[in-house]
Image (cartoon, helix red, strand yellow):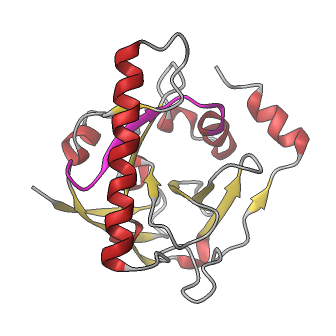
């Protein structure tokens, strides 16, 4: 059954609603990549976002169902790597929101669970969006079964993205300008020194 879940940053300045969450509407994945780990350390929220092995939980969804009702002035974005996704968060209390493509157009948002009021590794995440379907960028050696699950997860995600694109048109809510499809806030670009300091904390 799909449910609407309130969304808020930790200090409450940014609030909204995530519509229609269910196992059918999302992809629940785990990721231990250096980008996700560096991001958690960048925000100073490693304990909230990762387990002891450096894995983050993320649920991928249609961004049109991620509504921000107040606090737009506190939105911020960073690119941990030049080729990586935009990672949206709140500058008031460093609450992670979601990861997106660098520009709007194709619907995709990888939501970090903290904005729903639960720790990223909490069992409550499974109650909202179902069990983990696969692990992205899994640490080697990777068993064949894990590789297969990852392939199926990617196929499922891309089929959903194509359906969302055909059904709803170009994606722009909530982080992009409707006309230009550019980010509503200029992304922060880390220096090489900042990036190296964060990567030194990756496990």
Q: Position of residue 158 (x, y in %)?
A: 40, 53
Please indicate, yes or no, whether residue 34 appears anywhere in the rendered image.
Answer: yes
Q: Quadrant of residue 131?
A: top left
- Percent from the top left, x then y, of residue 31? 49, 33
Across and down, in percent, residue 86 comes to 63, 58
User: In what quadrant of the picture does the N terminus appear?
Assistant: bottom left
Horizontal relation, residue 26 to residue 140: left or right: left
Q: Which residues are magenta?
A: 23-35
Most foreground residue, 96 or 134: 134
Residue 32: within the magenta? Answer: yes
Task: Judge left or right: residue 54 versus residue 1.
Answer: right
Residue situated in front as seen by the camera: 40 or 93: 40
Above or below for 53 versus 96? above
Q: Could you tell me residue 122's position as x and y percent?
A: 32, 34
Residue at 37% x, 44% y: name it. Answer: 155
Residue 66 in sight: no
Nearer to us in this view, 112 or 103: 103
| Image position of 50 with respect to 146: above or below | below
Image point 71% across, 53% down: which residue? 79
Q: Residue furthest left?
A: 1
Looking at the figure, which quarter contains the C terminus? top right
**Residue drawn at 59 percent across, 54 percent down:** 94
- In this view, 128 is above or below 200: below
Magenta includes 53?
A: no
Residue found at x 40% / y 63%:
8
| Numbered marks: total | 0
């Amino acid at each position: 059954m799909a449910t609407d879940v309130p969304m808020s940053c930790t200090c409450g300045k940014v609030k909204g609603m995530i519509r229609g969450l269910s196992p059918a509407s999302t992809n629940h994945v785990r990721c231990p990549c250096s980008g996700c780990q560096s991001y958690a350390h960048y925000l100073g929220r490693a304990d909230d976002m990762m387990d002891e092995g450096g894995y983050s939980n993320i649920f991928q969804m249609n961004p049109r169902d991620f509504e921000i009702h107040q606090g737009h002035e506190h939105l911020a974005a960073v690119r941990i790597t030049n080729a990586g996704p935009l990672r949206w968060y709140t500058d008031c209390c460093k609450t992670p929101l979601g990861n997106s493509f660098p520009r709007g157009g194709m619907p995709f948002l990888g939501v970090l669970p903290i904005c729903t009021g639960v720790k990223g590794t909490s069992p409550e995440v499974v109650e909202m969006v179902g069990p983990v379907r696969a692990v992205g960028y899994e640490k080697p050696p990777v068993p064949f079964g894990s590789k297969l699950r990852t392939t199926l997860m990617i196929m499922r995600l891309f089929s959903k993205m194509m359906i969302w694109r055909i059904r709803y048109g170009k994606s722009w809510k909530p982080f992009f300008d409707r006309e230009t499809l550019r980010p509503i806030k200029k992304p922060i670009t880390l220096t090489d020194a900042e990036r190296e300091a964060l990567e030194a904390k990756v496990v």
